[in-house]
Every structure is written in structure tokens, then in C-alpha cells.
């Protein structure tokens, strides 16, 4: 059985954090762009009178 203690120094904390495995993050492909999008009339209507609330 291993007893886990709190780190007592910043160096111990950094060493502990370095042991945490990194998640697998998919690589970003070069030259790709986000899909274009448009605001629907229904979405625009929700904020059309926003200035009236100021």
C-alpha cells in the first residue's frame, strides 16, 4: 500500500503534476477552416429589441 501525502514544496507539486497523463487531443489539420454559418430570422428576432432594454 502506498501512502499519498500532500506536496510540501512547489517543486514537489510540479513533479506530481508532471506525472498526470495528458489527454489525447486530435491534431489540427493545416489549411482547414470552420464551416460558415448564418443567423436565422428567429435568432435575430430574439435580440432585435436589445437596445430597448438598456
Image: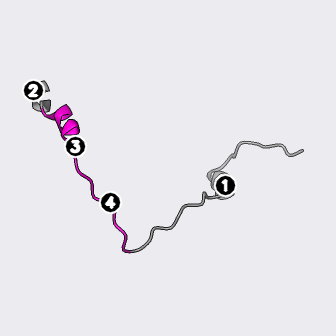
For label 2, the SS is: helix
Q: Pick out the residue farthest to the bottom.
A: 30
Q: Residues within 10 Å of mark 3 (few under 14, many from 20)?
A: few
- State whether residue 3 is above or below residue 12: above
State the separation of the CA atoms marked 3 and 1: 44 Å
State the separation of the CA atoms marked 1 and 4: 34 Å
For label 4, the SS is: loop
In the foreground, 10 or 34: 34
For label 1, the SS is: loop
Q: Residues within 10 Å of mark 1 (few under 14, many from 20)?
A: few
State the separation of the CA atoms marked 3 and 2: 21 Å
Q: Is residue 22 magenta?
A: no
Say which label, 2 or 1, has the lower sequence index: 1
The answer to whether the residues at label 1 and label 4 have Cβ atoms under 8 Å apart is no
Foreground: disc 3 or disc 1: 3
Q: Residues within 10 Å of mark 2 (few under 14, many from 20)?
A: few
Foreground: disc 2 or disc 1: 2
The answer to whether the residues at label 3 and label 2 have Cβ atoms under 8 Å apart is no
In the foreground, 7 or 47: 47
Across and down, in percent, residue 24 comes to 60, 60
Across and down, in percent, residue 6 comes to 71, 42
For the C terminus, which image quadrant?
top left
Residue on which disc 2 sits:
52
Stretch of the chain drawn in magenta = 31-48
- State whether residue 45 is above or below residue 53: below
Please tell me the numbered disc located at residue 40. 3
Residue on which disc 1 sits:
20
Residue on which disc 4 sits:
35
Amino acid at each position: 500500500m502506498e501512502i499519498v501525502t500532500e506536496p510540501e514544496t512547489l517543486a514537489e507539486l510540479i513533479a506530481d503534476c508532471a506525472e498526470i497523463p495528458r489527454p489525447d487531443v486530435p491534431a489540427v489539420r493545416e489549411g482547414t477552416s470552420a464551416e460558415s454559418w448564418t443567423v436565422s430570422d428567429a435568432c435575430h428576432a430574439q435580440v432585435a429589441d436589445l437596445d430597448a432594454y438598456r
